[in-house]
Image (cartoon, rainbow, N blue to C red):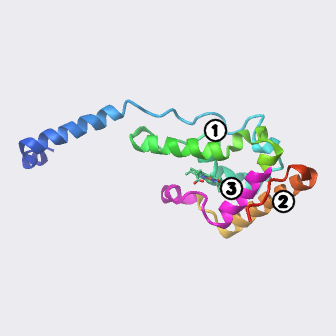
Amino acid sequence: MKNILQFLGQQKKKIFLGLLGVFVILQVFRPEANDGSVYSSNDITNAVGVPPDVKTILETSCFDCHSNHTNNPGYWHIQPIGWWLSDHITEAKKELNFTEFNTYTVRRKMKKFREITEQIEEGEMPLDSYLWIHSEAKLSNTQKKTLLDWAKMNEQILEKKYPDSVPPRKH
Ligand code: HEC
């Protein structure tokens, strides 16, 4: 450390210490952790049947962002990485929160099952940036099929039961 500072010289040393100071101060502003319960009286298992294999996939690959509980990695505590993660989770939950799935209207539920199908077919979820560090969350072809069959089946069941609420198709 001392050698590096000598090497940087007086001006650069000031800049470096300034940046270090800013970095230290940033650490005080930790984002609120997403540490509620994954399951609640309004969760997905109360809305539709969730077989054990589907449940495992959702827990391993989706719940860190799409539920009220993230298994916080250590770098949650390092800013600005923590803010960046927190932002992602807020966005993800706004789109789809499995912990609160049963509070959605029938129409929104159908839409969400349709979107799950789209996201999986297009290989968009889980997000690439997440898979870099969570390789266990990567979906195998078998897991993709399990999830797709489940989402499509539930969309169809709801469509049959509530034909008047079916959201219009985009295409
Ligand atoms: C690392 C966080 C993360 C993980 C893990 C993750 N998602 Fe997402 N998801 C997001 C974010 C952020 C958005 C909102 C922005 C976007 O669409 O990219 C989103 C959006 C969605 C949407 C709505 C897309 C639309 O059509 O608007 C669906 C459906 C979805 N995710 C399904 C899943 C499923 C299913 C899994 C698990 C297989 C999963 N996601 C895993 C972060 C994540």
Q: Is mark 3 within 8 Å of ligand 1?
A: yes
According to the picture, the residue beneath numbered tag 1 turns out to be 68
Task: Kindly report the distance in space between the C-alpha atoms of the residues bearing marks 2 and 3.
Answer: 17 Å
- Look at the picture and state if 116 lies above or below 26: below
Residue plotted at (52% across, 55% down): 130
Mark 2: secondary structure = helix
According to the picture, the residue beneath numbered tag 3 turns out to be 57
Task: Kindly report the distance in space between the C-alpha atoms of the residues bearing marks 1 and 2.
Answer: 25 Å
Q: Position of residue 3 (x, y in %)?
A: 10, 47
Q: Is mark 2 within 8 Å of ligand 1?
A: no
Q: Is residue 125 magenta?
A: yes
Disc 3 + disc 1, Cβ < 8 Å:
no
Mark 1: secondary structure = loop
Q: Position of residue 28 (x, y in %)?
A: 37, 30
Say which amino acid is labelled 2.
Met
Q: Is residue 126 magenta?
A: yes
Q: Residue furthest top?
A: 28
Label 1, residues with CA under 10 Å away: few <14, some 14-19, many ≥20: many
> Which residue range is magenta in the image?
110-136
Answer whether residue 127 is visible to the viewer in this image: yes
Apparent side of residue 39 relative to residue 68 in the rendered image (left or right): right
Answer whether residue 2 is visible to the viewer in this image: no
Residue plotted at (76% across, 54% down): 113
Mark 3 or 1: in front is 1
